[in-house]
Image (cartoon, helix red, strand yellow):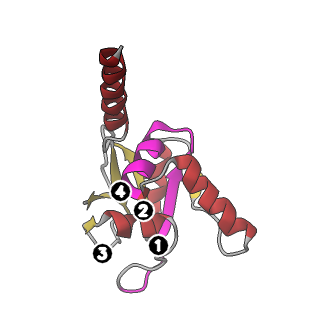
Amino acid sequence: MKTRILSAMVLALAVSAFASGADFRVVANNSVPVSSLSKKAASDLFLKKTVKWEGGAPVVPVDQLESSTVRQGFSKAVHGKTAAAVKSYWNQQIFSGRDVPPIEKRSDAEVLAFVRSTPGAIGYVSESTATDGVRVLTVN
């Protein structure tokens, strides 16, 4: 019995570690003046706590749909929260009249098209997605 419980716990931890792996890339418009960000800095950009890039240009974050696998992984890795918890944060911001969440795109292709064409834009795509025409940022 103890062996089964221990095995189940190990399996749950392994699945959790695999699911929260960094299966995404953060991408930005070529006008963005940085090549790397800390997790906190990236989180602050997507939560609109930081609204301007170095040099004063506005930050334009774009999210994927809450149900997407890439958003789930991004939220866990960068915000340290589930996508549902981030949505709850945005609901609080909306209801208090402080801000609105980033726009959402349905796919990696839509995120890339938006980021390519929008100065100051930052988003994320699946790790396996080709990222031609955008800057890939290192997040550590």
Q: What residue is pinned by disc 4?
A: 27
Residues shaded magenta: 55-78
Sequence-earlier tag: 4 or 3: 4
Q: Are the residues at dot 2 and dot 4 in contact (C-beta closer than 8 Å)?
A: yes
Give amino acid for label 2: Ile
**133 with respect to 66 (left or right):** left
Q: Say which quarter of the image contains residue 18.
A: top left
**60 with respect to 73 (left or right):** right
Q: What residue is pinned by disc 3?
A: 33
Please tell me how crowded label 3 is: few (under 14), some (14-19), or many (20+) other residues with Cα within 10 Å. some
3D distance between C-alphas at marks 1 and 4 = 13 Å
Indicate the secondary structure of the residue bearing disc 2.
strand
Q: Say which quarter of the image contains residue 27.
A: bottom left
Residue 135's spot in the image, x, y percent? 29, 60
Sequence-earlier tag: 2 or 1: 1
Give amino acid for label 3: Pro
Residue at 74 percent across and 67 percent down: it is 95
Q: Which mark is residue 122?
A: 2
Q: Which mark is residue 117?
A: none
Q: What residue is pinned by disc 1?
A: 59
3D distance between C-alphas at marks 2 and 1 = 7 Å
Residue 137 is inside the magenta segment: no
Residue at 44 percent across and 69 percent down: it is 44
Task: Identify which residue, 46 or 27, lies in the foreground.
Answer: 46
Residue at 47 percent across and 45 percent down: it is 71
Q: Are the residues at dot 2 and dot 1 in contact (C-beta closer than 8 Å)?
A: yes
